[in-house]
Amino acid sequence: MAPAEAREHRPVDRAAAELFLAAPRVRRLMEIHARENADELRVGVQQYFVLRMLRRTGPRSSSELVGGTYTSKQTLSELVDSMVGAGLLTREQDPEDRRKVVVMVTPEGMRVAEEFERSQLALLHELLEGVPESDLEQIANGLAALNSALSVKRETGELMRIAHSSFRAGEPAR
């Protein structure tokens, strides 16, 4: 039985099954698109996530970036090193705590992030072509609600608890 057919009794079951199918497909297409356009975009998906977080939150320490980007310390360190070398990020002493170093987006990093977003949105527009407008409105509303719920769970620390929770066969993750 395919995941989308597994549990269609409650709306949450069907939504989870559809998201299970769609999210990895869309993410993979976005990664392929970024790789195919790497020369123009200058960053991949992981690097973009670092830029996006820093644009949203302002300067952060490496340990804060690890938690916010869901990457390992080593992976993040390698990403930041390459992005500093490319002129997309800088490392500076934290003005509030001189023992601490923070990572910041450069103006060039801002420009590259904006270009990456434009490119990815163009891809998503193309993928959504042919979907009826009424369905697009429902998709947008549903995704906005999902993003809101994820933000609340991230702020309360529940998001990572859920991600690290144990799975029992036949039961939805709780």
Image (tube, rainbow, N blue to C red):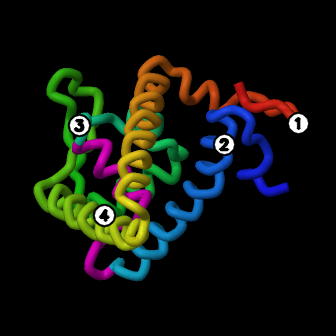
Q: What is the three-letter code of the residue carrying label 2?
A: Arg
Question: What amino acid type is highlighted by mark number 1?
Answer: Ala
Classify mark 4: helix, strand or loop: helix
Identify the residue under disc 1.
169
Which residue position is annotated with label 4?
Answer: 121
Q: Residue 128 or 62: which is nearer the viewer?
A: 128
| Picture quadrant where residue 58 is located | top left
Per the model, the C-alpha gap separating discs 3 and 1 is 42 Å
Q: Where 45 falls versus 152 (above or below)?
A: below
Could you tell which of marks 4 and 2 lies nearer the N-terminus? 2
Q: Residue at x 38, y 52 (%)?
A: 134
- Of the residues tagged 2 and 3, which is closer to the observer? 2
The residue pinned by badge 3 equals: 59
Q: CA distance from mark 4 to mark 3?
A: 26 Å
Which is in the foreground here, disc 4 or disc 2?
A: 2
Q: Tell me where the magenta segment starts and ends, as one range.
A: 39-55
Which residue in the protein does label 2 denote?
14
Whether pointer 4 and pointer 1 mark residues with C-beta atoms closer than 8 Å, the reply is: no
> Main SS type for the magenta part?
helix
Q: Compared to 161, does 119 lie above or below?
A: below
**Labels 4 and 3 touching (C-beta < 8 A):** no
- Of circles 4 and 3, the one toward us is 4
Please give the name of the residue rendered at 11% of the width and 56% of the height, measured from the top-left corner: 107
Quarter of the image with the N terminus in it: bottom right
- Alpha-carbon distance for marks 4 and 2? 26 Å
Q: Pick whichever of labels 3 and 1 is earlier in the sequence.
A: 3
Q: Mark 1 touching mark 2, by CB under 8 A?
A: no
Task: Determine the CA span between mark 2 and mark 3.
Answer: 39 Å
Q: Is residue 136 left or right of residue 21?
A: left
| Structural crowding at the residue carrying mark 2, measured as other residues with C-alpha within 10 Å and reported as few (<14), some (14–19) or many (≥20) | some
Q: Quadrant of residue 45?
A: bottom left
